[in-house]
Amino acid sequence: MPVSPCPVLLPNIVIIARHVNRSAPTTTVMCKWIRPESKSRLITLPQIRQLMETLHLKANDARTKVWMIADADRMNQQSANAFLKTLEEPPENSLMILLSTQPDRLLETIQSRCLRLNFPGDSSSTMKTEHQSWLEVFAQQLAVKDSGMLDRYKALDTLMEKLAEARHQIEDGLKDRFLGDLPNDAEPKIREKRDKELKAAIEGQYRRRRTDVFNALEWWLRDAWLLSLQAETSTLTFPDLAPATHALATRTDAGKLLDNIRLVEKLQRVLHSNVQEALALEVHLLKLNL
């Protein structure tokens, strides 16, 4: 099963591969990638077997072979066990990079054999640029005095519109990368394979973007909790939303506001299972303490 270059990941892999091979006699690099491709968005056993076979090949002029596994937590039980065998006896001169926003979902035996590096998400300034506008609408809808069920559903609509916007942006950004170079007379099997890769890539990037959205929501809920504890406005992540945040903080006690943060954390865990997104959002957001 040949490995085609990943339009999204390959540039980053090449940079890493060239760095670890900077003392090699040529700039030739050997780098491959794996990401979920099946309909269920799982990394399958055949993909892992392909990785294992490639890792045992000679690295040509490059001294180190580089593999990157995107959404590594999506390995099923069979593929995870097969990958574990590779980790137990790794080939010489090989570097395997596992990317995951949910590393705790990996087998503990895999985690224990990896060096874990944590990369921060959105910086405060980036978070404000990306999320403040929709959060302002969301906060005002929930900050209404004597807010009722209608206000909660309005806030839910605001959140779902933000998620829909994120998905559309991802789809528009990836379609040309995955399908743009396909000729009109491409074989059906090749087109079907690219379509599957596109769907998996869209879903993977959407889940990461969705995580960013909920992280921003958690930070705003944290702001409300801080204000309930008489914290200074300067400590808030979204100080420009202070009026609406303060309205929520003054009518809800600190314990319940902390429960709101835990509720959103639980929602994110639930969304990583096979549940309907809209239903999960409705069930959890209607439970917010306001």
Image: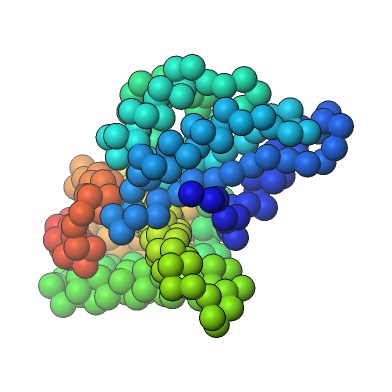
Residue sitting at 16 percent across and 77 percent down? 150
Q: Where 93 sits versus 178, above or below?
A: above
Residue 37 location, x and y as percent? 40, 55
106, 30: nearer the viewer: 30
Residue sitting at 54 percent across and 68 percent down? 178
Residue sitting at 36 percent across and 21 percent down? 109
The quarter of the rendered structure image containing the C terminus is bottom left
Q: Where 145 sits versus 117, above or below?
A: below
Task: Please tell me in which quadrant of the rendered image residue 177 appears.
Answer: bottom right
Outermost residue toward the bottom in this view: 184
Residue 165 location, x and y as percent? 42, 74
Q: Mark yes or no: residue 206 visible.
A: no
Q: How is the image coloured?
A: rainbow
Q: Where 45 sits versus 164, above or below?
A: above
Q: Is residue 81 left or right of residue 61?
A: left
6, 273: nearer the viewer: 6
Residue 277 location, x and y as percent? 23, 63
22, 123: nearer the viewer: 22
Q: Mark yes or no: residue 160 visible.
A: yes
Residue 156 location, x and y as percent? 25, 70
Q: Is residue 178 left or right of residue 247?
A: right
Task: Please tell me in which quadrant of the rendered image residue 184 appears.
Answer: bottom right
Outermost residue toward the right in this view: 25
Task: Please tell me in which quadrant of the rendered image residue 129 appears.
Answer: bottom right
Residue sitting at 54 percent across and 81 percent down? 185
Q: Is residue 285 left or right of residue 63?
A: left
